Amino acid sequence: MTTNPAIRGILLDIEGTTTPIAFVHEVLFPYARSHVKSYLATHLDSPETRGDLALLRDEHARDVQQQLRPPTLVTAPRDAEIESVVSYIHWLIDRDRKSPGLKSLQGKIWKQGYLDGTLLAPLFPDILPALERWRRVALKIAIFSSGSTLAQKLLFAHTQSGDVTHFIDDYFDTSSGTKTAMESYRRIASDLGLATEKLLFISDVVAELDAARVAGLQTVLCIRPGNQRQPLAHGHKIIRSFDEIAFA
């Protein structure tokens, strides 16, 4: 697949694009779920954790208002607060909620797992060669994921191919907007200093690609083993490996 030679930047999704979906759902999510209680017991009173809990409490209030019946949150005593937060976090994880508070807290929990070697991210075998090729032709490379920027940096710093963060110029999470909102992609292009038509977005989700295309980005649907089926009539170019991407 030959892309527009005017492309000067590549924006990448993670899950199902650079990393198998199974790593996220079968390794990262269970790790955060099983370690959240011990993490809170140690870090409950840190300003960073309290900031995450404030976001979670705001989200919980919205869930209650919408009659979604989330687990009850309490503020005291300490052990009861931790138990209630753990129950709510498990409830959010079960729903695969793209929650800013949850994603931020998960990133902090995963950090210890990456640092002690428990967690090691698998990249598809075509990823590292592609990053090397794109760097040689001076393309900007950025990541856009619903996971926190901390979680993104940790993942790419601890892969089975080694630390690949030196190939990546910037990281974007939902603080830039949701992945299905056109404005998110315009904001990211502006932050990268690129016109939207000079930025190529690669993802495994058609709804995200649709939003990026409306924003003016070039788009490619990445199909990997284990990915969810996508609508057939989408109009995006399709690849199954980054080896298929060539620049005229």
Image (cartoon, rainbow, N blue to C red):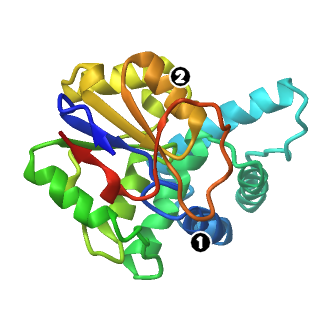
Quarter location, residue 151: bottom left
Q: Quadrant of the N terminus?
A: top left
Q: Which of 218 and 247 is in front in this view?
A: 247
Count the marks: how many?
Answer: 2
Disc 2 target residue: 181
Mark in front: 2 vs 1: 2
Q: Which of 178 and 102 is in front in this view?
A: 178
Residue 118 percent location from the top left of the image: 47, 81
Residue drawn where x is 51% and y is 41% of the image: 51
Label 2 element class: loop
Q: Which amino acid does label 2 sit on?
A: Ala
Q: Which of 94 and 69 is in front in this view?
A: 94
Instruction: Indicate whether 44 appears above or below 35.
Output: above
Label 1 element class: helix
> Which numbered tag is attached to residue 27?
1
Name of the residue lying farthest toward the bottom: 117
> Which numbered tag is attached to residue 192?
none
Instruction: Indicate whether 58 appears above or below 52.
Output: above
Q: What residue type is labelled 1?
A: Val
Cα distance between the residues tagged 2 and 1: 28 Å
